[in-house]
Image (cartoon, rainbow, N blue to C red):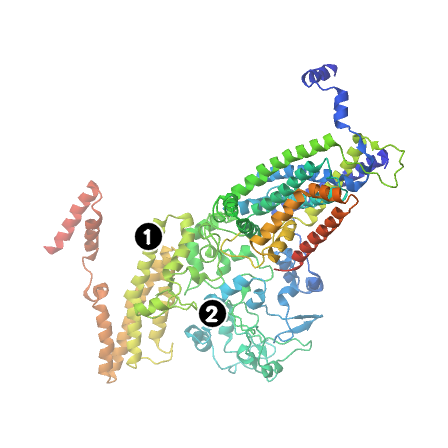
Amino acid sequence: MKLTTKKSIIGALGLLFLCSLVLVQWMEVARRSEEAGLKEPHITVPATSVACVNCHAQTTAGIIDHWKGSTHARKGVGCVECHQAQKEDADAFNHYGQLIATVVTPMDCGRCHQKEFKEFTLSHHSKAGNILASLDNFLAETVEGSRVNFNPHSPTPGMTPVVEKVNGMASAFSGCQQCHGSKVALKSSDGGAITLDDLKPGPDGKPTNADAVAKIAKDSNGKPILTANTWPNTGIGRINLDGSRGSCSACHSRHDFSPRRARQPENCGKCHLGPDHPQKEIYEESKHGVAFRDLKDKMNLDAEKWVLGKDYSQAPTCATCHMSGNMRNGGKVTHDPGERISWTNRPPVSVLMDTDKDHKIVNETDPEKRRALIADTWQDKRARMMDGCTTCHTSGYVNNFYRQYDDLVILYNEKFAKPGLSIMKSLRDNGMITKTEFDDKIEWTWFLLWHHEGRRARHGAAMMAPDYTHWHGMFEVAQRFYTEFLPEARELAAHSAKDGKAAQAKAVNDVIDAILARDEHKWFKEGAEGQTEMIRKAMQERYGTGGPVAKSEEKSEAKTEAEPKK
Amino acid sequence: MGVVANFIRERIPVSGDQLRELTNEPVPNHLRRWWFCLGGTPAYLFVVQIVTGILLAFYYEPSPKAAYESVHYITDEAAFGWYLRSVHKWGATLMIAAVILHQMRVFFTGAYRKPRELNWMVGMCLLICTLVTGFTGYSLVYEQLSYWGATVGANITDTVPVIGVYLKKLMLGGEVYNERTLPRFFMLHAAVLPVSIVLLLGVHITLLRLQGVTEFQFEDEPEDGPKHFNFFPDHLYSELIIGLVLMILLSVLATVLPSTMGPKADPLTTPEVIKPEWFFYVTFRWLKLFSGTAAVLSMGFIAFTMFVWPFIDGLVRRWWPKSEFSVFAGIFAVIAIVGLTTWEALVKH
């Protein structure tokens, strides 16, 4: 080869190399702008989803727009990857050549997110659908609505089609089940509904009852029809047709499944708010919530791992404490929030979270038997939670906080919850209230006491919101107990006595009297005159007088206290 | 200008003629053929590895607690970090491939024969240093496969009779992989091995210059034509072309197939499939075929045979001067290496 030829080749290759460096520079700039949010991230539409994206961009643009902003889109996970179905699936249908299903269940997500699916399935979240036919649901289905659809009593002007039947379960469907999850149902050709109870899915989620499958009603395109009562629904404990429990999109909203959003308290606030469990409001009132509002911009919410103490430490959110990784636990994330909760404040009387191998709370009271059943103690759970706490606080500080929290829960349990339960039991045992819930006034009173006010007090203490612990909590518990609950119980006993049931009335009154004779309730019966002074004196004995000024105050107070005795 | 030239000449007493002679050795005609230029390729890639390696070392932290995160930082956050890491990774792959190809060329052309036996052995040392550098570099990422690859490597070392247990301890800084292991690998990868390679390269090139390049006469070359051409600029241009092609190739590979990261090393979870880097597939498969000490000893024997091949070849040729024994042995070895590598690449376990 001639030297001039070599020179030309070197020139051409040099130019090519320069071009490759320009390409590298261009890629680096693009990466930086993408990171800075100046540029839309590069997305890859998998070949199988190109047609879906093109069509739905016209028909349901919001879905595609959200999906384009998702990690799924950046990693080439398209529509078909999640919505794919097999022909054996009860809800499968052919959609322009692709066999898909509308409802994406945790089992579907588990195809890729196996660890998360397993953890979530063991969580209390996934069992939230068990509320169906519970006390809370009785309220919505019967008290607020009607288990039987009934005729409207007058027309609704302008409403078409004309309302022929009132859907008595509307409150349960739009209320309870939107958080707790519906039992997803397909329309049956005989006018009924087909759920997993009929389909009897096997471990692979495929129905085993061919008769039920044969009855599934389909629209003109061959698509199985989901009943409007149960779909749309993103309740966290949704009971799906494939037998899996829950809905990942309850927290990871479709179709962008943003981790950023799941990390923020507003996400949990869809359900964890309101009079009975205002966790969201409690959090907002706490120092944690205040810090979050102020420092949100520095919280690095887009970080890939989002490890407390590493990626951020400005403030914790719900996810931080209950689910996310922290510096001390090696960044371990869990999709079972129960792994870190030491008390359950859900029932009338709070219970320590000793759980068995199936993650169920152990209720055994015999110490030996209890120990044998426990697979994960409440102390283990608390230690996991404390990994997060001690990323920012000293262990002494955290231990003292837990002491305050335990004390409040035990105070509530012992002073109001257990006595309340025994009075309710006595009323029921003595026939003063029926077995039907909410048909007696005192049942509403008791429900408000533990379900609303009692939970507010306990949750307030759990998450450091003093106003919820006291004014919205213990104050209202006490007020309800002394001024409504006890008088109503006494009144029921008096009515009973008047009706000739003296023995039953006495039994109830005995229970109440025994409770009021206890030290903590004595004040109500015997009065508490001079108690302020007694408390002050006891405090001074315990903590001292606090210096010369206080001493002079002590003298004057002692004088004041002495005076009445004269 | 004259003042500057004089200043330099007085302090570096080398004349222009001497310099020209030193740098412009006549190059044998056969080197006009591209495949004879493979010897320069690994050296060129070595320079690329040194430059990118220094830049990566600015960010890398050799401790189990920080290694993975620092590589993550290089890959995802540091400016051009992904490019440097990818060029370094592909540079290593190409360098090992180039060393193997160069060795094959030397072997099949018999260029190791007397008086170049020692240079062949130096080349063998360079091959081993290159492979160990690749192994230690792979371990530095501290992802699952690199951690378990290193653990498997240490366990293999353990099976070497007598000294194995000590070698393993020396390698890991303890009985098992621990917090002292990564700093060792890093020192080997970034200091000991590169310096060894530089020294060995110095010996390799010095011997080459002293003995001259083996000269070949090809049938299509006129016998009465010039036997040599100039190093400068003719051969230098060829090397420059190869260098540029390599840089473009590296850039393309780094941008099209950039280095990614697997899950972080978890000493408590053994991955279902443990695979070393591709250049150890052959030994890995060999170890699976003949487990334990037998495999290690046989591998040691093969390595020793490769080391002393020029002398074995010399003996054979003394007895059968026209024998093509070496060529057949080489073909067999290449088939075995390619076969075992492909086998390992195709199977899951």
Give neighbour class at mark 1: few <14, some 14-19, many 20+ (Cα, 10 Å).
Answer: few
Q: Is residue B201 above or below residue B5?
A: below
Q: Which mark is residue A110?
A: none
Which residue is pictured at 43% across the width and 61% down the height?
A: A339
**Callout 1: helix, strand or loop?**
helix
The image quadrant that residue B187 belongs to is: top right
Which residue is pictured at 61% across the width and 37% down the height?
A: B194
Which residue is pictured at 33% across the width and 52% down the height?
A: A400
Q: Which mark is residue A400?
A: 1
Pointers 2 and 1 within a single chain? yes
Q: In 3D space, how far apart are the residues under numbered discs 2 and 1 (Cα atoms)? A: 33 Å
x, y percent for residue A245: 51, 70
Q: Tell me the kind of residue under disc 1.
A: Asn
Q: Is residue B229 above or below residue B299?
A: above
Instruction: Name the outermost residue toward the left.
Output: A566
Q: Tell me the kind of residue under disc 2.
A: Lys
Which residue is pictured at 67% across the width and 55% down the height?
A: B340
Instruction: Out of A538 and A322, give the one closest to the viewer.
Output: A322
Name the residue that disc number 2 marks.
A127
**Callout 2: helix, strand or loop?**
helix
x, y percent for residue A89: 61, 74
Confirm whether residue B110 shows in the render.
Answer: yes
Query: Relative to A332, is B56 on the left or the right?
Result: right
x, y percent for residue B262: 58, 53
In which chain is the residue bearing label 2?
A
Sequence-wise first label, 2 or 1: 2
In which chain is the residue bearing label 1?
A
